[in-house]
Image (spheres, helix red, strand yellow):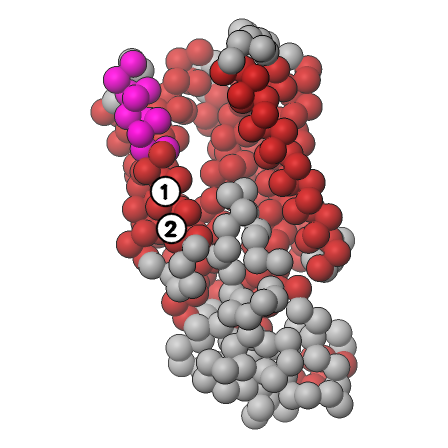
């Protein structure tokens, strides 16, 4: 299961037919860690071979803790790359908000930026290795799109972007808390069920978009500003939270299994995709609950 974000990309720390985050940890007494379940076994050998605590971790049912090793991804790497990527999104959004007044021209630029961001995201998604230039480029164009979109919403529902940011932070924090507390176990079955629901959701929204475009659902259909639209928005945010749990698991396992350092960019890329998804849906939800059509 490689996909773990709204565009269902092929990003991930897996280099085989599996997904590192959902591979069962090798059992004590079985093959050494790195030869079974570790997608990096052929990339620099087994990082746990000299780790006296690896077997103890496995017996306790916890992912093995990777020993310090040059060139291996760490949480600091993930935090730094994520800050750079999200920071680029924020800078792009602020500049677009400040320099592009709400108009047909700015709408056109926003749509163009969204298309460029989508293309860059898809190119990175199908690459086997992280390309920082693609990821930062995606973040910059996505930022322009979000800046214009946020300004548009703010012009009709004052304060909506700020509320959406707070809502996104709340969802992210709550999801992380639930994940770290162990209330959600990210297993292969969990991922399959969640991805099935997410794919079905996106397909239904695509059909709805076509119906709206052809005038069959002029009021927006599932994306209306009424109760149905609110329900769809809440479901979309819950799906975003699901993607966050996959992101957290992917990062955790990537560190535990000794992922190469440059794959911290993939973690940042995935988190950015997911957070943008949640923010946009939160923005729509705030507008619906504002009750001013």
Image point (56%, 33%), residue name:
167
Which of 121 and 63 lies nearest the eye of the viewer?
Answer: 121
- Dividing the picture into quadrants, the one containing residue 95 is top left
Identify whether 109 is placed above or below 278: above
Which of 166 and 138 lies nearest the eye of the viewer?
Answer: 138
Pick out the residue farthest to the left. Answer: 99
Percent across and percent down for residue 206 are 56, 28
258 with respect to 55 (left or right): left
Q: Which residue is mark 1?
A: 119
Q: Main secondary structure of the magenta part?
A: helix
Residue 21 visible, this angle: yes
Image point (75%, 90%), residue name:
29
Q: Residues within 10 Å of mark 2 (few under 14, many from 20)?
A: some
Percent across and percent down for residue 117 are 36, 40
Image point (40%, 81%), residue name:
70
Asked whether disc 2 touches disc 1, contact meaning CB atoms under 8 Å apart, the reply is yes
Is residue 83 magenta-colored? no
Q: Which residue is mark 2?
A: 123
């Amino acid at each position: 299961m490689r996909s773990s974000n709204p565009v269902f990309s092929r990003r991930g720390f897996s280099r085989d037919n599996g997904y590192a985050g959902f591979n069962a940890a090798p059992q004590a007494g079985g093959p050494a860690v790195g030869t079974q379940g570790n997608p990096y076994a052929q990339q620099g050998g087994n990082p746990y071979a000299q780790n006296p605590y690896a077997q103890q971790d496995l017996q306790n049912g916890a992912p093995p803790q990777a020993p310090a090793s040059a060139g291996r991804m760490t949480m600091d790497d993930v935090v730094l790359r994520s800050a750079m990527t999200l920071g680029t999104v924020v800078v792009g959004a602020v500049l677009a908000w400040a320099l592009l007044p709400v108009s047909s021209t700015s709408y056109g630029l926003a749509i163009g930026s969204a298309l460029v961001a989508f293309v860059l995201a898809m190119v990175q998604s199908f690459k086997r290795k992280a390309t920082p230039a693609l990821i930062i480029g995606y973040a910059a164009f996505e930022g322009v799109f979000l800046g214009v979109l946020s300004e548009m919403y703010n012009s009709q529902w004052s304060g909506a972007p700020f509320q959406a940011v707070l809502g996104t932070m709340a969802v992210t924090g709550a999801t992380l808390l639930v994940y770290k507390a162990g209330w959600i176990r990210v297993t292969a079955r969990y991922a399959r069920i969640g991805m099935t629901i997410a794919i079905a959701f996106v397909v239904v929204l695509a059909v709805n978009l076509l119906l709206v475009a052809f005038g069959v659902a002029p009021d927006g259909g599932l994306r209306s500003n009424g109760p149905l639209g609110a329900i769809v928005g809440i479901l979309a945010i819950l799906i975003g939270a699901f993607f966050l749990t996959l992101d957290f698991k992917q990062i955790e396992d990537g560190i535990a299994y000794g992922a190469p350092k440059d794959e911290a960019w993939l973690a940042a890329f995935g988190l950015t995709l997911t957070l943008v998804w949640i923010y946009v849906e939160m923005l729509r939800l705030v507008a619906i609950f504002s009750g001013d059509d």
